[in-house]
Amino acid sequence: MIAQTIQLALAPVFVLVAIGNFMNVLTGRLGRIVDRSRHLQSLHTDTQGMDHDAVVRELRSVDHRIKLINRAILFLVVGGIIIALTVGLLFVEGLMGFDMEGLISATFFGAVLLLVAALITFLRETRIATADLRIPETFL
């Protein structure tokens, strides 16, 4: 019985590993965005006119990107907690004999939905970053 429960718990554990790897990517990206934000903040007082306006525009964009990355990380953390709950419920069901298939299915599905939400949020952030980094035609 315990061996079968462990086998059932493997799928959610693989999702948990994927969430951890994705969080690594997001935290690395967040670190680079924060560094860029600090650099732009130092330029804020040293610029004037059109250059200052460009710095302010980029600061706004960077601020929005930071919020999106933080939201994606939140989705992943909550999803990871729900996956851990799913694994715990699998063991409670297997060891205690309770019928919790509906609850276990709901928690797993909820965690997958949070993973999808994190991916969509990450896509939004990367689209903003790409739009900000377009190379002007004059350089091509």
Image (spheres, rainbow, N blue to C red):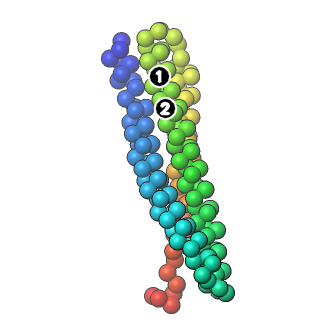
With respect to residue 98, does 110 lie above or below?
below
**Residue 124 in view:** no
With respect to residue 33, does 9 lie above or below?
above
Q: Which residue is at 62% across, 76% downward?
A: 44
Q: Which residue is at 43% across, 53% downward?
A: 25
Label at residue 3: none
Viewport quadrant of the C terminus: bottom left
Instruction: Choose the circle earlier in sequence order: 1 or 2.
Output: 2
Residue 97: percent from left, percent from top: 47, 9
Q: Residue pushed farthest bottom?
A: 138
**Residue 49 in view:** yes
**Mark 2 highlights which residue?**
83
Kindly indicate the quadrant of the structure image that contains residue 42.
Answer: bottom right
Residue 40: percent from left, percent from top: 56, 73
- The amino acid type of the residue labelled 2 equals Ile
How dense is the environment of label 2, judged by Cα within 10 Å: few (below 14), some, or many (20 and up)? many
In-image side of 25 versus 50 (left or right): left
- Measure the C-alpha gap from mark 1 to mark 2: 9 Å
Viewport quadrant of the N terminus: top left
Label at residue 88: 1
Residue 98: percent from left, percent from top: 51, 11
The residue closer to the viewer here, 115 or 61, is 61
Mark 2 residue element: helix
- The amino acid type of the residue labelled 1 equals Gly
Mark 1 residue element: helix
Q: Which residue is at 42% across, 43% downward?
A: 20
